[in-house]
């Protein structure tokens, strides 16, 4: 009896569109990561690095379109590649989620970049002024009363910090909080006579891209207590998407909390004179 041979098992081909969707997603992830590294470590100027980042976002969007086309092709001809499409979609969503959130913030928040607790006499950028003179950088001068009105309408709780501690202690508490945040301190001047005004200038960084945002803090005496004024301003871009306001409000909360833990100074009590004894005859 002759042996019968069956035809070898035939597998469906992998969709080329699915493969390209995955390739574009991986390329977008690598380009986004490289652009973030470039900005954080200052290998290039901000604008070329941002162009690389936006190019990565475009690749992620293109990957989604190619993935959708691959899904339609697989549905019609039964080819393989769904796992590649799903992997590409996961990568694309991870890349686009944060920019999508920032776009929502851009629509909700005012287009300002300079936040302060004292818009009439904001803390000045002195040591930081020379760092804001590059091409495309925002000026060191305060953004103006129009920015102050938008700030007041959006964040009415940003006000000066009034403390019941001496100005020297308020300066020490504030400097500790700045160092704890690992901001780069450019200048620090403790309160000294005759005006006893302390100043701190530092550079903060945004969490992901690491954009530089400059902070100036003024600590001044207010009777027996003290007053702390804070200013935070983006070095680049006209809109900060709320990052400076968030930084100022968080620092205000931490300063108040630290001051509450400081024991109140006791005022010296004058000794009470004993009343003269009764019944003592005068000589």
Image (cartoon, rainbow, N blue to C red):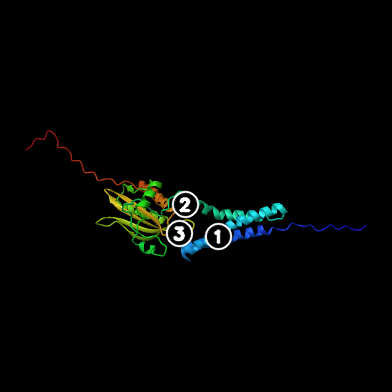
Q: Residue at x 57, y 53 (%)?
A: 93
Density class for disc 2 (Cα within 10 Å; few <14, some 14-19, many ≥20) is some
Answer yes or no: is residue 116 visible.
no
Disc with the residue nearer the chain's start (3 vs 2): 2
Which type of secondary structure does the marked residue at label 3 adopt?
loop
Separation of marks 1 and 2 at Cα, in angstroms: 20 Å
Density class for disc 3 (Cα within 10 Å; few <14, some 14-19, many ≥20) is many
Coordinates of residue 34 in the picture (x, y in percent): 53, 63
Separation of marks 3 and 2 at Cα, in angstroms: 17 Å
Answer yes or no: is residue 75 visible.
yes
Coordinates of residue 151 in the picture (x, y in percent): 39, 49
Position of 202 with respect to 31 (left or right) is left
The C terminus - image quarter: top left
Residue farthest right in this picture? 1
Coordinates of residue 175 in the picture (x, y in percent): 36, 55
Name the residue that disc number 2 marks: 106
Name the residue that disc number 1 marks: 56
């Amino acid at each position: 009896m002759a042996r019968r041979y069956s035809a070898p098992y035939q597998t469906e081909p992998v969709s080329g569109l699915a493969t390209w969707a995955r390739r574009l997603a991986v390329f977008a992830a690598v380009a986004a990561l490289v652009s973030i590294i470039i900005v954080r470590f200052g290998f290039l100027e901000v604008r070329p690095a941002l162009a690389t980042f936006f190019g990565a976002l475009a690749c992620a969007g293109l990957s989604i379109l190619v993935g959708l086309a691959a899904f339609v092709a697989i549905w019609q001809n039964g080819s393989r590649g769904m796992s590649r499409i799903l992997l590409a979609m996961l990568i694309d969503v991870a890349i686009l989620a944060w920019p999508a959130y920032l776009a929502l913030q851009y629509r909700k928040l005012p287009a300002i970049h300079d936040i302060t607790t004292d818009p009439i006499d904001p803390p000045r950028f002195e040591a930081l002024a020379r760092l804001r003179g590059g091409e495309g950088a925002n000026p060191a001068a305060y953004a103006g009363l129009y920015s102050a009105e938008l700030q007041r309408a959006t964040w009415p709780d940003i006000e000066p910090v009034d403390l019941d501690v001496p100005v020297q202690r308020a300066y020490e508490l504030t400097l500790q909080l700045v160092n704890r945040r690992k901001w780069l301190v450019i200048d620090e001047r403790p309160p000294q006579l005759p005006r006893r005004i302390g100043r701190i200038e530092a550079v903060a960084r945004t969490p992901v891209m690491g954009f530089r945002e400059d902070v100036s803090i003024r600590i001044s005496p207010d009777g027996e207590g003290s007053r702390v004024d804070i200013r935070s301003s983006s070095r680049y871009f006209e809109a900060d998407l709320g990052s400076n306001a968030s930084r100022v409000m968080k620092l205000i909360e931490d300063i108040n909390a630290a001051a509450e833990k400081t024991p109140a100074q006791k005022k010296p009590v004058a000794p009470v004179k004993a009343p003269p004894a009764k019944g003592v005859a005068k000589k």
